[in-house]
Image: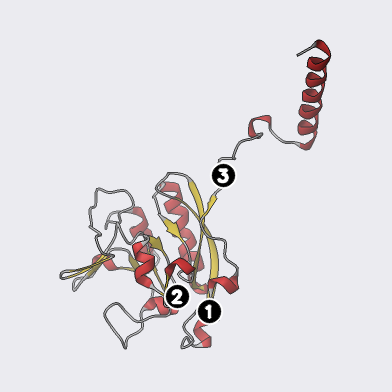
Amino acid sequence: MNKLGANSLTYLLVVLIVALSVLGVPLTSVGKRTFDEPIVDSNMTEQEAFDGLDPNCPQNIRTKQKVIVVKYYSFDMKVHQGQLVLDEDLESDVRSVFDLAFQERFPIQSVIPISHLRFRKDGKWDDNASMDANNTSAFNYRFKTGSTTSLSNHAFGRSIDINPFQNPYIKGRTVLPRGAKYDQRMPGTLTSRHPVVRRFISLGWTWGGNWSSLKDYQHFEKP
C-alpha cells in the first residue's frame, strides 16, 4: 500500500472512532455480541401462541392466559429468551422462579409455547412432542396423563413442566418422555433441595417429585 492509501485508511479509521465515540458506542462492542443479548428461542405473537388451541377450551380459561417473556441459561451456558403461556395470576410467581434459576445458572433446554408447529401432531398441540424435545411449557388445554375425562392443571395454565428429559414422569414402568432417566447428578435436574423447587413450594406450589402414587419431577402446579 502506498503512502497516500495508508493515510486515507488512517483518516477513515479516525473518523469512525470519533463517530462511535459521539454516539456513545463502546469500541469493545463493535463487531461483538453483547453479553446480555439473548439467543431467542421463542418470539411468538399472541395470535401465534394460541394458534391451534383446542376449540373445546372455554373462553373464560382462554382469556386468563398470558404470554410472558423469560430469560434463562440453556445447556450451552448462554443466555436464551423464551416464552411461557400461563394464567395471568401466576406471572409474579413464575418470574420469581425464573429470576432465581437465572441467578443460579440452572440450565433449561428451551421455553417455547406448545402451540409451536414442531410440537403438533395431526394439527393438535402434543405434550409428548414437547417432552421429547425437552421443552419447558405451561398452558395446554388437555387431560391429565393417562386420563380421558379429568382435565390437567395445564388446561388452566396453572402448571409448568421444566426440563422433562432430566425430570421425567414415572408411574410404574411408564416413563415419559421415552428414554428419559432421573439422575440427580445431571445438570438441569430438580431435587427436593434444589433452590428452584424450594422457591416454588414457598410460593404455594406443589411439586410432582413429592407425590407418592407416581413421580412427575418436571411438574409444578398451583391449584
According to the picture, the residue beneath numbered tag 2 turns out to be 157
How far across and down, in percent of the image, does residue 223 sit? Answer: 38, 77
Check disc 2: other Cα within 10 Å, few if <14, some if 14-19, many if 20+. Answer: many
Disc 2 to disc 3: CB gap under 8 Å: no
Q: Which mark is residue 50?
A: none
Quadrant housing residue 167: bottom left
Q: Residue pushed farthest front?
A: 1
How far across and down, in percent of the image, does residue 156 sit? Answer: 44, 79
Mark 1 residue type: Lys
The Cα atoms of the two marked residues, 2 and 3, are separated by: 29 Å
Mark 3 residue type: Asp
Q: Residue pushed farthest top?
A: 3
According to the picture, the residue beneath numbered tag 1 turns out to be 64
Identify the residue at image location x=66%, y=34%.
30
Compared to residue 12, the image places residue 183 above or below, namely below
The Cα atoms of the two marked residues, 3 and 1, are separated by: 31 Å
Disc 2 to disc 1: CB gap under 8 Å: yes
According to the picture, the residue beneath numbered tag 3 turns out to be 36
SS of the residue at dot 3? loop
